[in-house]
Amino acid sequence: MAKIRIPTPLRAFTDGAADIEVAGGTVGEALNNLVDQHPELRAHLFNQDELRSFVNIFIGDEDIRFLQGLDTEIEANESLRIIPSIAGGRSLGVEN
Amino acid sequence: MEALHSRLADLSNDEVKRYSRHVIMPEVGMEGQRRLKASSVLLIGTGGLGSPLALYLAAAGIGRIGLVDYDVVDFTNLQRQVIHGVSTVGVSKLDSAAARMLDLNPDIEVVKYNVPLTSENALRIFGEDWDVVIDGTDNFPTRYLVNDACVKLGIPNVYGSIFRFEGQLSVFYAEQGPCYRCMFPEPPPPGLVPSCAEGGVLGILPGTIGTMQATEAIKLLLGAGDPMIGRMMLYDALEMSFHTIKIRKDPACPVCSVDKEAVVLLDYEQFCGMPAHDHSEFSSVGAADELDVQTVTVHDVKSALENGDDILVIDVRDPHEWDISAIKGTLRIPKPDIQLAKNGIQAGRKLWEETVLQEIPKDKTLYVHCRSGVRSADSIGFLSEIGYDLDKMYNVEGGILAWADEIDPEMPKY
């Protein structure tokens, strides 16, 4: 099992949960299990089967882009983090 | 690391006394304090992050502090922008901040740039001899602009960002490590992440992150300790947890992996698909932009509700906004839920009757409202994409703010 840390902006799609335990031997499997549990997250993380370019996934303190990406193996009890892109008070600028 | 510069300024006896708690520390000493006085720091934004930054950097004796902001102090700023006050509501943020900084420390110089930072003026402003730039902005276009201009000019960029109870801190200094784009090559498209404007922020959070940015700036100037180059600190106020991750330089980074000469500032509003500031002429491509959405006034809504007309009024704001104020007799479904349902239906993952949209009959006349009318127009756009009749949907002009102004003066505005 791996623990995935959900950032505040995405907790709207996990019923508010901040940490979610999922099964999976690789980062890709764990994330797929995550979006199976919380289908609304899928569109935020994936474009088809590819991780969206602005989604940063860290395992421990390392960016998976510099490991083996979605194929990076998860050791027992390692935790994953989704690092959000946040900008501050007017993050989207388009709101009224 | 080494200090960013070797300039030293003379201190008066009064200044030695003022800074005595610094001067007696070996990490600062007389030399460090003289170095701080000879230093210059440019703050982008004098809002939530900029307030503690400006106060503490002024107090610390940074000799020359630049402020870039175009806004005036608003009453709602005071929940977090502690450099301003009731007495400066309506005053330019630059004048308000500068007065407070000089009251705290008259020995410093404050340079005011009363403009929105743009691709046209950034290199000129950043080029006016700043040792460190601190990003205290509140939007993606300006963050990418600050990054790219700093990379081009070889200036360290002390980055801080906040959302609700969560904060991020790093130092992006392409001369010695990664830049913002190595970590965030491109921004999330508008509409795909939950918005922050209604998301809010704990007023203390920019204080926490802003003071950490000030700490990093001072460390860079003194050459003391380990700066946050190549690292990002993630702060969660609810857990009171700090977590540091590694950020690596992307060898294919479109900005910091190329020759500085070749870095060209972009139209960052176009790049991010959103305006950078209130004075912007940028028009974001919302779901409703291509559509001719019909409108009704709040008076129409009131009489339709009172007469029991066969219409449905839908409030697409977020649930916590309903707690602040709401019109009685509305169906409440947040815009992101409508958008997600629409996406699911279009992708074939969901049937209409499996989504929240089953609460919205397709044959009924709909009056849709939000806070001021933008999200509701977008929601109408989404609904029209999946079979709702555009001729039966009306956007409530001015949203609940207009209702508060014209129908119910007792209703709180936010």
Image (spheres, rainbow, N blue to C red):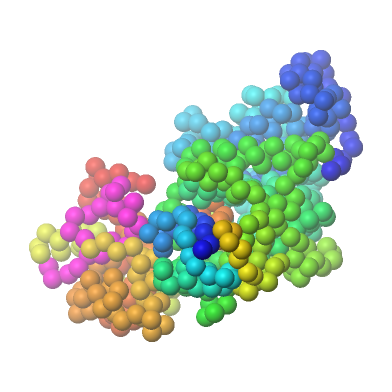
The vertical placement of B174 against B47, above or below, is below
Q: Position of residue B328 (x, y in %)?
A: 19, 55
State which quadrant residue B197 falls in: bottom left
Q: What residue do we see at 40% from left, 77% from top?
A: B343
Instruction: Farthest residue to the front: give it.
Output: A76
Q: Is residue B407 left or right of residue A70?
A: left
The vertical placement of B19 against B377, above or below, is above
Q: Position of residue B356 (x, y in %)?
A: 28, 70
Q: What residue do we see at 66% from left, 56% from top?
A: A61
Q: Position of residue B288 (x, y in %)?
A: 40, 73
Q: Quadrant of the N terminus of chain B?
A: top right
**Is residue B98 among the parts visible in the rendering?**
no
Q: Position of residue B237 (x, y in %)?
A: 51, 42
**Is residue B319 among the parts visible in the rendering?**
yes
Q: Is residue B203 left or right of residue A76?
A: left
Residue B73 is covered by the magenta coloring: no
Q: Which residues are magenta?
A: B309-330
Q: Nearer the viewer, residue B16 or B249?
A: B249
State which quadrant residue B313 falls in: bottom left
